[in-house]
Image (cartoon, rainbow, N blue to C red):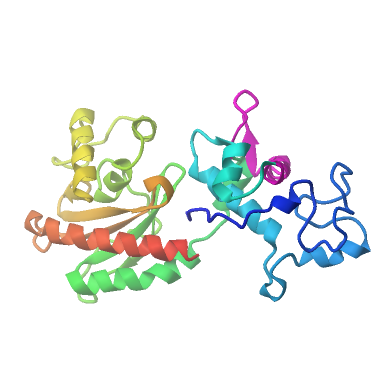
Amino acid sequence: MRTPKPLPPDENIGESTDENSGSGSGSGSGSGSGSVFGAGAGAGNASRMAEPGGSSGKVQSLERAISLLEATADTAPDGETATNLASRCGLNRATAWRLLSTMEQYGMVERDPLTSRYTIGFAVARMASAAGFDGLIRRTHGILRQVCEQTGETANLAVVQQLGLTYIDEVTPPVVLSAKWLGRQAPLHATSTGKALLAWLPEEEVKSLLAEPLTAYTDTTVADRGRLSAELAETRERGYSVCVGEMERNLYGVSAPVLGSRDRPFAVVSIWGPQDRVPESRFPALGALARGAADEVARAARAL
């Protein structure tokens, strides 16, 4: 979710040497005895486990690997070559190649043998599926609470998962009875939440996510693909999506995408309520609030 930060140039470590080695190139390139993450062979290199930064506690080679991994994610879905990834991260090609090769062995990245482009590997997806959302909820719950207090309506946060969106946090006005969406998946074509996601995805992904027939939940559900495509274009132009009773006849609302790298949505902020309290005349003001909250959530997520 973060933009990779270029790291300090590493001109002197092109062939497995390290700034804090103390033995120059003693652990040597080409010997295969040194780890690509900087832990060389021999007791003399034990101090290299606490790489540059000394008391900072940071491991420079691990920072480099993470930077490469984030840069690789930012080039999805096409991927990128080791040379260009190295340039993006401020690393020399030899170092980048060794780090990428090691991560490839562990399934963290995949290399296309025809193009030599690297993409994120399945191991990352497997680990991501085991991750919880506690950290994101802790950092963003206050944003939702503030939106709820400003509008008097329900505010919630949904995150993008493999096949759509799942609601992970919600703040409701204390005197209002409302539907509970926590843990539920959003029908993408029939909610403002879903349309906020679809509007910022490439067309091919939208087609894949909407491969099944579009269910008409109410008489206002947009079940025609042509009309939906036109609405998604309008949504992207104004910066937020709307729902006029398309999932449940009396529920109206607006949503804005939380954008990560390359303006790709990874979550959605929504504001919604009964039609008599959230009429279409309120959509512009609520849409602006949703966009502002989404920007705040994006900043909070980058701090994770």
Residue 180 visible in this rendered orientation of the protein: no
Q: Is residue 243 left or right of residue 139?
A: left
Q: Say which of 105 and 42 sits in front.
A: 42
Residue occupying image coordinates x 19% and y 55%? 253
Residue 56 visible in this rendered orientation of the protein: yes
Is 106 within the magenta?
yes
Q: Residue furthest top?
A: 114
Q: At which x and y percent is residue 258?
A: 35, 55
Q: At which x and y percent is residue 236?
A: 24, 44
Q: Is residue 24 above or below residue 79?
A: below
Q: Say which of 69 and 146 sits in front.
A: 69
Residue occupying image coordinates x 59% and y 56%? 7
Region of the chain picked out in magenta, as a range? 94-119
Count of numbered labels shown in the rendering:
0
Q: Say which of 303 and 95 sits in front.
A: 95
Residue occupying image coordinates x 50% and y 33%? 78
Residue occupying image coordinates x 90% and y 54%? 26
Q: Say which of 23 and 53 sits in front.
A: 23
Q: Is residue 282 left or right of residue 303?
A: left
Q: Is residue 14 above or below residue 56?
A: above
Is 92 within the magenta?
no
Q: At which x and y percent is residue 23?
A: 88, 60
Q: Is residue 145 left or right of residue 33?
A: left
Q: At which x and y percent is residue 65?
A: 65, 52
Location of residue 282 by image quarter: bottom left
Q: Is residue 252 left or right of residue 191?
A: left
Location of residue 47 by image quarter: bottom right
